[in-house]
Image: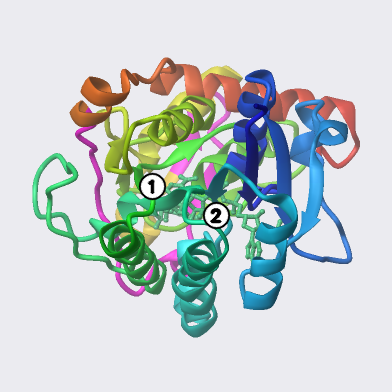
Amino acid sequence: MTKRALITGISGQDGAYLSKLLLDKGYTVYGGHRQSASGEFWRLTELGIFDRIEMVPFELLEPTNITRVLQKVRPTEVYHLAAQSFVGASFEQPIYTADVNALGTLRILEAIRSVDRSIRFYQASTSEMFGLIQAAAQAETTPFHPRSPYGVAKLFAHWATINYREAYGLHASCGILFNHESPLRGREFVTRKITRGLVDVHLGRREVLALGNLKAARDWGFAGDYVDAMWRMLQRPAGDDFVVATGHTHTVEQFLEAAAARLGFPIAWQGEGVDQVGVNAQTGRVVVRVDPAFFRPSEVDTLTGDARKAQELLGWTPTTTFQGLVEMMIDADRARATRTPTGD
Ligand code: NAP
Ligand code: GDD
């Protein structure tokens, strides 16, 4: 029987890579998308798969819509990726973020409970739940300490998923994914902001790139690798929770240095704190500066994942290095910039 996957958040980064993976495996893919004036599916178009996806209007705030979608699509697997996913915005929109990310997940779980309990469910949990880290490397057993309304809402969704597994026997899994990036990453996230921004500076399209906390450190992997772990979780005999990460951590500064190196120039750092600047060491021009507007009221300073459980039980390992990821993103943004006047 053909497997039928419903992916919520089909227009996002992970929705695109997961769709490609599942289509290649022979799945029928239903893409949940919210109604918007722009109808942006540029990621699916870039991967050449837009025409192969059955689009379904889907809104996390509307429980009746969620139930109808499940009744209509009759999925065998639901990959719940939709979310207000930008941590920075969650400080300005905490209630909306909780409604979408926390209650939105609960709405899907309730709909599965009443429509068909055999549906396998994937919850997009996050390393942001570790926040103020309680162990040098964070594993499934590490205590959580979220530092943003986003992280708090995701922690609710995480425990709701575990609760529905325990209470109603759902095949429900949480992937505690660490930051994963790609050429399809949204431009508001720091990696893509850097690759896109530095390309623009390099081409003379803008003067300088303004960023927030340059000392923040993340365990950055490639999104194309991480969606494979999602699929592996739902093929297991029962639901479970898994950390997905590379185990390697770099700072925003190091990401900038690697991105600039790919563009052919070294960055020299001068000054401290809000006065710190990054200078193109070949030209002497300031290419990076700090803008406190991008600081967060409470920050996640550093994250490093311990993905040994995923390696042992899912047979999953990342294939892309930090260096490879930065180069892939710079090359893609440079190619886009030369294709169109605005570089979109
Ligand atoms: P993304 O690119 O921001 O995509 C988010 C998706 O959610 C978009 O398709 C968006 O639709 C949709 N969405 C937002 N609000 C919605 C609503 N009210 N109803 C229905 N759909 C809605 O995120 P991503 O990077 O692919 O991440 C996928 C998931 O993994 C998210 O839940 C994120 O929180 C989680 N996660 C991501 C990472 C990471 O590093 N990328 C790490 C851990 C966990 P529009 O296009 O209409 O806005
Ligand atoms: N976005 C952004 N913009 N972040 C900046 C900037 C800037 O100008 N300057 C420094 N940073 C720092 C942030 O303060 C943060 O410490 C780090 O760079 C990463 O920020 P983001 O790329 O916005 O990602 P995130 O770690 O907050 O959240 C992402 O990863 C989570 C998993 O840990 C998102 O994809 C979440 O949805 C995901 O759950």
Q: Which residue is mark 2?
A: 210
Magenta segment range? 278-307
- In which quarter of the view is residue 130 placed? bottom left
Mark 1 Cα shell of 10 Å, populated few (<14), some (14-19), many (≥20) = many
In the rendered structure, which amino acid carries the disc numbered 2? Ala
Label 2 near ligand 2 (CB < 8 Å): yes
- For the C terminus, the image quarter is top right
Q: Which residue is mark 1?
A: 171
| Along the line of sight, the residue nearer the viewer: 225 or 215 | 225
- For the N terminus, the image quarter is top right
Residue 236 percent coordinates (x, y): 35, 31
The secondary structure type at the circle numbered 1 is loop
In the rendered structure, which amino acid carries the disc numbered 1? His
Q: Is residue 196 left or right of residue 123?
A: right
Asked whether residue 167 is in view, the answer is yes
Residue farthest to the left, as pictured: 135
Q: Is residue 165 magenta?
A: no
Residue at x 60%, y 27% (from the top left corner): 329
Asked whether residue 62 is in view, the answer is no
**Image height of 34 relative to 61, above or below:** above
Q: Is residue 46 left or right of residue 70?
A: right
